[in-house]
Image (cartoon, rainbow, N blue to C red):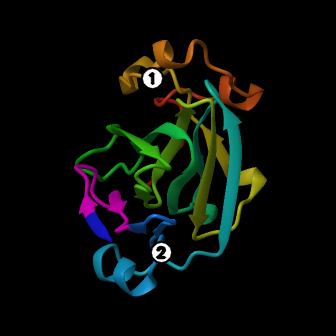
């Protein structure tokens, strides 16, 4: 695997090495010793999967306080635009975001440390999104920032999907200014 740290310190792009032949391919999607060598020690305790259709936008989600989560995300079917926002007050990139396409063809993954909000929009007909987290989900600790908060400057590709489909929770998200941050 190839590990590349992004301009947002602690956020890593991880590209697998695929070994293919006429039958298909094989690749490792996670190898703890390599992960720790590049990213650091993270103990994943839960793995989740969502399945969505074109235009579904999920986010920008995060867990607050003692239930904050680091995530290792990937797409096992389809294509998405994945977005993370730095909520760490002391960070040089506080308030900045990163948008990156993830798809099943490349197998590219993204590691998102604690202190970031995360969301994505489905660009293909459907997408299966998988992610490992280092802390258990806690309903009372979840938070959401509005995907369309103009202060973040995120360019969501509405023209690529026609229209967005959002949950009531996502439509009711707070602005970046109102959202709880990380110290």
Tell me if mark 1 has few (under 14), some (14-19) or many (20+) residues whose alpha carbon lies within 10 angstroms of its own.
Answer: some
Q: Which mark, by number, is residue 104?
A: none
Locate the N terminus by quadrant.
bottom left
* Label 2 vs 1, first from the N-terminus: 2
Q: In the image, residue 162 lies at what x, y percent? A: 57, 12
Badge 1 marks a residue whose secondary structure is loop
Q: How far across and how far down the image is residue 172, in percent? A: 69, 25
In the image, residue 176 above or below residue 103? above
Q: Is residue 173 magenta?
A: no
| Magenta region, residue range | 4-19
* Rendered residue at 44%/45% (across/down): 102
Residue 1 versus residue 8 in the image, above or below: below
Please give the residue where the numbered disc 1 appears in the rendered image: 156
The residue at the point 33 percent across, 59 percent down is 12
Q: Please provide percent x and percent y for residue 28.
A: 46, 74
Q: Picture quarter containing residue 153? A: top left
Looking at the image, residue 104 sits to the left or right of residue 125; the answer is left
Residue 181 visible in the displayed image: no
Residue 119 rendering spot, x and y as whole percentages: 54, 39
In this rendering, which labeled residue sits more in front, label 2 or label 1? Answer: 2
Asked whether, in this view, residue 3 is left or right of residue 32, the answer is left
Give the CA separation, mark 2 to mark 1. 29 Å
Q: Which residue is mark 2?
A: 30
Q: Tell me the quarter of the picture where residue 132 sits.
A: bottom right
Residue at disc 2, secondary structure: loop
Q: State yes or no: residue 6 in magenta.
A: yes
């Amino acid at each position: 695997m190839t590990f590349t740290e992004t301009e947002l310190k602690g956020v890593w792009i991880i590209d697998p090495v695929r070994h293919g032949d006429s039958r298909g391919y094989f690749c490792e999607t996670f190898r703890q010793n390599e992960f720790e060598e590049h990213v650091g020690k993270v103990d994943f305790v839960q793995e989740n999967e969502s399945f969505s259709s074109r235009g579904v936008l999920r986010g920008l989600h995060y867990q607050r306080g003692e239930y904050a989560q680091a995530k290792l995300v990937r797409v096992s079917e389809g294509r998405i635009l994945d977005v993370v926002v730095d909520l760490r007050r002391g960070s040089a990139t506080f308030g900045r975001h990163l948008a990156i396409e993830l798809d099943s063809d490349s197998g590219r993954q993204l590691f998102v440390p604690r202190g970031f909000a995360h969301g994505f929009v489905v660009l293909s007909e459907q997408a299966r999104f998988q992610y490992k987290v280092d802390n258990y989900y806690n309903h009372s600790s979840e938070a959401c920032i509005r995907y369309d908060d103009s202060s973040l400057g995120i360019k969501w590709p509405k023209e690529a999907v026609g229209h967005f489909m959002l949950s009531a929770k996502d439509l009711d998200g707070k602005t970046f200014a109102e959202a709880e941050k990380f110290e």
